[in-house]
Amino acid sequence: MKRFLSLAIIMSLALSYTVPVLAIEDTVVGSADKSTGIVVNDNKQEKKSKKEKKKSTKVAPQKNKYEYVNLEWWKGFNDEILSGYIVRAIENNKDLNMATLTIEEYYQNVKAQRANELPSIQAGFMPGYAKVFGETAGTFGLPVIASYELDLFGKNHNKTDSVKKLWEATILDERAAYISIASAVGSTYIDIVKHDALIDLQEDIVDLRKEIFEIMSISNSEGLVSTSDLVKANQSYIAGVSALTDLKKERTKLLHQLAVLVGDSPNNIEEYKRIDYKTLAFNGTIPEYVSSDIVLQRPDYLKAEKMLEKAGLDVRAARKELFPTINLGGMLFFNSQHLESLFTTSNMLWGFGGGLFQPLFMGGRLMANLKMKKIAYEKNLKNYEKVNLTSMQEVNDALVTVNMDREKLAKQKEIQELEKEDFAMSQVKFSEGVIAKLDLNQMEENLLSVNKTVYETEFDCMVNYINYYKAVAAKTDMAEPVVQG
């Protein structure tokens, strides 16, 4: 009976099903296209060594969270308040917290998959009451079972590497999240400061329009101004008040947004400080040209590369499912009617065995799985090429916007200087009694309107700098101007 039991356990171990696989050749993927815009292509994309890849993906994310956002670049705004909000977002933003937890989750998936490459050992205790031969009696059993799939072709190792690529991709997702949140905080903060400027200027415009309406009311009562002109002045004043209300509403919503970005309650927006809009400026440098190698540092590009590598590993594992599975198993079993004699050699039964199984007919399941993995590889290859092109486009768009808006701002400042000179001349004329107060107020409103336009463009340029920072994945130290001979 004991021999029969031992044989049955060993057979059950041998019947566990696994299949190793042959490796397919690695596919070398180059640039999907050449950039012909502002980004200068070097016509070469150097491969990283395996050592460098391991170093880039196996660094603890928590230690790198400040390096992700390149805090030195943000110091170019010379605003400690802005830098403080960036730090608060790094520490408290909920999306970033979840991204970090996702990394840990996928790391545990790697450990769980790696367990399939190791032997498994199980032990138990089996008290019972039975009749086999002779009289019925109570028995105590202690089975110890070991099993191991001999990964001769490396199928299980390929599966572990595939899961590891997902873990490495989540690290890149975390880096992208940090850059995105830092950019959102910076853009939102600058937008708030811009609204501070626009609100101050709009309040001056409203005061002027109110004064103009009051002067025209007096003039209308004396028959010097038509009722139609008075109505238009009143409409202009009401429109100015309405525009001021909209600006304040937008600023409040932006403050709410900033609070959530830094992980705080929107109820605390009254505590949120910002720099005086007249002193905020960006002193960093944005090059006119950058090397296309900057694309290779973007987390979305690196993630697409990881997913392509994972798809290749999945194809290898699927191919290896077609080959034999080799299993090893062993059993140690103690069985006795008395606990005190359970561990004696006379009551011990052991066995060791193995098995090789080759799938012959699976209804086409294995071939279908292999074809699906190949299709997934092709899709990841196309996505890799798409990300390459999209990354170049975003860098090009960011640089074009920065340079064009700089030119636009320069022209608007020229107009602003001319408007200032015109208003200064109007002040002289008013002091000499050549023009009326109403005319002077209208000239001042024109100047304030030009000032609003200049401030809007100036702050938009700062947001453009942040968009460039995001496009180059915060690797602004690599984006040096290209020296052309």
Image (spheres, rainbow, N blue to C red):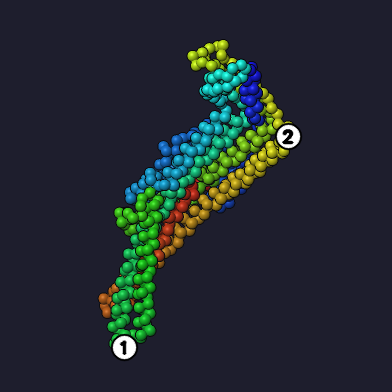
The answer to whether residue 352 of the structure is visible from this angle is no
| x then y, percent, for residue 265 | 35, 52
Viewer-proximal residue among 373 and 393: 373
Q: What's under tag 2, amino acid-wise? A: Phe
Furthest residue to the bottom?
223
Q: Which mark is residue 361?
A: 2
- Residue 406 image offset from top left, x and y in percent: 44, 58
Question: Residue at coordinates 67% horizontally, 34% vertically from top-left?
Answer: 319
Q: Is residue 393 visible?
A: yes
Image-quadrant location for residue 368: top right
Kindly give the residue lying farthest to the right in the view shown.
360
- Name the disc covering residue 223, or none: 1
Nearest to the observer: residue 115 or residue 271? 115
- Residue 400 higher or lower than 110, as above or below: below
Query: Is 354 above or below relative to 313?
Result: above
Task: Please name the residue shown 36% across and 67% down the image.
Answer: 245
Q: Earlier in the sequence, mark 1 or mark 2?
A: 1
Q: Residue at x 55, y 33 (%)?
A: 113
The residue most toward the front is 135
Residue 132 x %, y %? 61, 19
Q: Secondary structure at mark 2?
A: loop
**Viewer-proximal residue among 6 and 35:** 6
Amino acid type indicated by mark 1: Gly
